[in-house]
Amino acid sequence: MIRSLWTAASGMMAQQTNLDTVANNLANVNTPGFKKSKAGFQDLLYDSVSASAPPPNTSPQTYLTDPTAGYPTPPALQQVGHGVRVAGTSRSFLPGTYESTANTLDLAIDGAGFFCVVMQDGKLAYTRDGSFRLSGNRRLVTSDGHLVSSQGSQSGSQAGISVPEGTTKVTIGTGGEVRATTTSGETACGTIGISVFPNPPGLEALGHNLFKETPASGAPKHLTPASEGAGTLLSGYLETSNVQVVEEMVNLIVIQRAYEMNAKSVQSSDEVLAITNGLIRR
């Protein structure tokens, strides 16, 4: 009975992690560029209550002529498991829908790839959230003030993209070309690049809609939009979260029922132990 208590408890803890994952998905249903996660599970080690009987001594000649000679039918193997554990969480990088914002600095990637940004410590991070703006020194940055990297360096350009003083309008083409309109005419300000990874699900989430490179994701290729498999840019659009609310609500119901069944197993084990204790006291 003690084993069943711990087995059911492991199921409750696993479902709690599953619930945390679904709750985070639902909390970010309106987060631009958010990618939903899913928890994966593994069963634990098994106790072998009985094992197959060892084969009797058989001469090599007899075995060569009849491999089954002297081998009785083994008894049925009895194994009891120890429950479940969370093997990890996987992230889906399926695209969300594209929402029109009428803001030319909002960008969405139609296809594969990520925007490369430079954080305050100089390290590179990657995002699908294209809600950009101009900083006080007229540089293109994220909503958190991270510099948007320009295309042209395999390690990510630290220079970023700046528009001249007196700019009245900024336009961004599907190929990432940034052009600023001033009183003296139109000026090219650089090109926004797209970074493509061999295995995007291997990226590590940093929060703030940012990811970082890991050995599992592989090294990124910094490309011009619409080249070598990279997506194109959509100015005036944002990619919404790929969370499907109805799907996550169904997952909540499944998790709740699984948690209740594991709790019922704990209750049943406790009741059987109480009965056993009552017999001993008598």
Image (cartoon, rainbow, N blue to C red):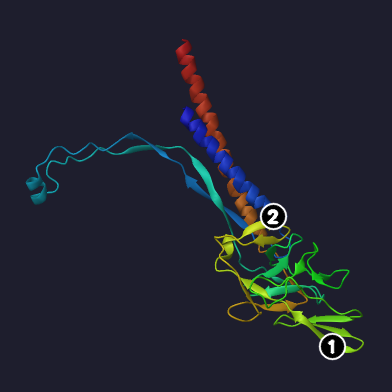
The correct choice, above or below, for 276 with respect to 61 in the image is: above
Q: Secondary structure at mark 1?
A: strand
User: Furthest-top residue in view?
Assistant: 282
Name the residue that disc number 2 marks. Answer: 26
Residue 256 in view here: no
For the residue marked with disc 2, what is the amino acid? Leu
Q: Residue at x 70, y 78 (%)?
A: 233
Q: Residue at x 8, y 51 (%)?
A: 65
Q: Position of residue 159 (x, y in %)?
A: 76, 73
Name the residue that disc number 1 marks. Answer: 186
Picture disc at residue 82: none
The correct choice, above or below, for 251 with respect to 228 in the image is: above
Q: Position of residue 162 (x, y in %)?
A: 82, 76
Residue 197 in view here: yes
Residue 94 or residue 181, whichever sits in front: 181
Residue 213 or residue 10, whichever sits in front: 213
The label nearer to you, 1 versus 2, is 1
- Give the class, few, some or many, for how many residues have Cα within 10 Å of label 2's Cα (few <14, many ≥20): some
